[in-house]
Image: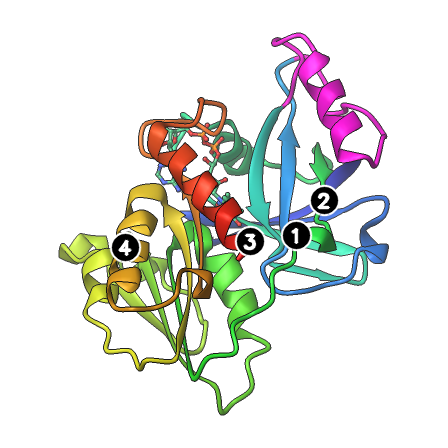
Amino acid sequence: MSALTVTSVAPLTPRMTRVTFTGDGLPAIGTWPDQQLKLLFPKPGHSAHVSDSPDVGVWYQAYLALPDAERPWMRSFTVRSLADGVLTVDFVLHGDSGPASRWAANAQIGDVIGRFGPSRDYARPLGTADFLVFAGDETALPAIASLLEPLPPEQRFAAVVEVADPVEEQEIPGVRWVHRSAGDDLVTAVSALEVPPSTWVWLGGEASAVRALRRHFVGLGVAKEDIEFAGYWRRSLTQDDAPTAEDLAEARERIASLGE
Ligand SMILES: Cc1cc2nc3c(=O)[nH]c(=O)nc-3n(C[C@H](O)[C@H](O)[C@H](O)COP(=O)(O)OP(=O)(O)OC[C@H]3O[C@@H](n4cnc5c(N)ncnc54)[C@H](O)[C@@H]3O)c2cc1C
């Protein structure tokens, strides 16, 4: 685990803020699309430091061994960019109830949090199909943007992102925006896409929407191993809450698809 120190904070939209960090080990990480990492947010009166072990098993045991009141909140995020030793993360400001969202809304230059990852061990190759679909909500926007950037110009794709309203749109070429304020939603918009038989799909965002879309594409005949999917957050549940029966079923399917 390494410390990250805030070097800038800038609002991107009313509900999304961009934070840049410096920290030990960043220049050695390298870059790839959809780089996922764990960020650790300190509990009041404590630091976010856990253990310096690079071994994930050892590190996680040390994390669990900390008393509740000291154990930092751990949340998943995506590298928006990593260049010249500067890590950029875009945080959705979804309200005060989440420690990550609350931290981001109040972040100041010099604040220190922790990070574990990103690791190349978790990098997944992009599909090689004729047509690629990327779909998610604002939490998946950093990942979708990083996946679209390296696509060759001849690659055919659809990228659909659901946000609260038009002011939440960002300058990301190729994205079709869906606005909750207009009564539209991701599942309806993506289900209306016409896709060819050779299609690969990437889904991220609110867990029930991701599940519904995965079912939709399986129903269209897209092979399960050609659907990369992850529930990024669960309505009314924090990332500390235990997995639901649906989460566990999804995890089992994901493990099974890795073996196929
Ligand atoms: C692999 C991965 C990559 C991710 N990348 C990013 C990223 O780059 N940027 C980013 O902002 N998020 C990202 N997320 C999503 C983020 O981890 C979750 O939104 C997380 O719950 C935020 O933690 P929190 O402490 O703010 O809220 P929590 O303590 O986890 O949840 C508190 C409450 O807020 C609700 N909640 C959580 N997220 C949202 C939301 N987006 N909208 C509305 N309500 C919400 C929960 O249902 C709960 O009721 C990613 C998730 C994963 C798994």
Q: Which residue is mark 2?
A: 117
The quadrant of the rendered image in which ligand 1 is seen is: top left
Residue type, label 4: Arg
Q: Is residue 133 visible?
A: yes
Q: Residue at x 30, y 66 (%)?
A: 177
State the separation of the CA atoms marked 1 and 4. 24 Å
Sequence-first tag of 3 and 2: 2
Q: Residue at x 73, y 20 (%)?
A: 61
Image position of 40 (left or right of 162): right
Residue type, label 3: Leu
Residue farthest along the bottom direction in this orientation: 154
Magenta segment, prevailing SS (helix, strand or loop) = loop
Q: Which x, y percent locates residue 56?
A: 75, 34
Where 114 falls versus 180 (above or below)? above
Helix, strand or loop under label 3: helix
Kindly check if marks 1 and 2 are in contact, taking CB atoms under 8 A apart as contact. yes
Helix, strand or loop under label 1: helix
Mark 2 Cα-neighbour bin, 10 Å: few <14, some 14–19, many ≥20 = some
Kindly check if marks 1 and 3 are in contact, taking CB atoms under 8 A apart as contact. no
Helix, strand or loop under label 2: loop
Instruction: Single out the mark in the foreground, 1 or 4.
Output: 4
Label placed on residue 122: 1
Where 155 falls versus 132 (above or below)? below
Sequence-first tag of 1 and 3: 1
State the separation of the CA atoms marked 1 and 2. 10 Å
Q: Which x, y percent locates residue 176?
A: 32, 72
Q: Which residue is mark 3?
A: 258
Residue range corresponding to the magenta coloring = 45-72
Q: Which x, y percent locates residue 110?
A: 73, 37
Sequence-first tag of 1 and 2: 2
Image position of 34 (left or right of 116): left
